[in-house]
């Protein structure tokens, strides 16, 4: 299983399209080998959407968590756990990729 690094920079894969529709963030794989064949669309909860929107290929995960800690009342430990869990799942499904800083 691929492991998430807090110091790493991530961005959405070019093989997915994400759109916000009526308050829901919907992620659609546009290439085979992405996600799970049984699921064609993915949605994220409020925290997941906030994390996804910050995956710009320039900020490290730890920087994203610092920004989120200013927006949410959860502790840094909770935010780290939630963010790492989400990103590990997205990375496993090839929906995000590790990026070099630009």
Image (cartoon, rainbow, N blue to C red):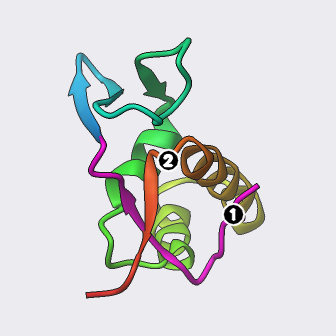
The circle drawn on residue 28 is none
Residues in magenta? 1-15
Residue 62, image x, y percentages: 57, 77
In this figure, which residue is indicated by the disc labeled 2?
Answer: 94
Q: Mark 1, mark 2: which one is toward the viewer?
A: 2
* Vertical arrangement, residue 39 with respect to residue 60, above or below: above
The answer for how far apart the CA atoms under marks 1 and 2 are is 20 Å
Q: Number of labelled discs?
A: 2
Task: Residue 78: give x, y in percent of width and height.
Answer: 75, 56
Instruction: Determine the residue positioned at 72% across, 65% down.
Output: 3
SS assignment for the magenta stretch, majority:
loop
Viewer-closest of 71 and 96: 96
> Residue 60: horizontal and vertical position, in percent?
47, 78
The quarter of the image holding the C terminus is bottom left
Residue name at image x 55 percent, y 68 percent: 65
Looking at the image, tell me whether mark 1 or mark 2 is earlier in sequence order.
1
Give the labeled residue for mark 1.
80
Frontmost residue, 37 versus 57:
37
Residue 6: say if magenta: yes
Residue 32 lies in what quarter of the image?
top left
Residue 64: % across, % down: 47, 69
96 is higher (above) or lower (below) than 98: above
Question: Quick one: SS at disc 2?
Answer: loop
Q: Residue at x 35, y 53 (%)?
A: 12
Label 1, residues with CA under 10 Å away: few <14, some 14-19, many ≥20: many
């Amino acid at each position: 299983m691929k492991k998430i690094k807090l110091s790493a920079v991530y961005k959405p894969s070019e093989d997915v399209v994400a759109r916000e529709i009526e308050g829901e963030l919907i992620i659609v794989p546009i290439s085979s080998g992405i996600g799970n064949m049984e699921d064609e669309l993915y949605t994220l909860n409020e925290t997941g959407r906030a994390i996804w929107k910050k995956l710009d290929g320039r900020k490290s995960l730890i920087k994203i968590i610092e920004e989120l800690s200013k927006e949410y009342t959860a502790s840094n430990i909770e935010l780290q756990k939630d963010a790492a869990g989400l990103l590990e799942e997205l990375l496993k499904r090839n929906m995000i990729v590790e990026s070099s800083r630009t």
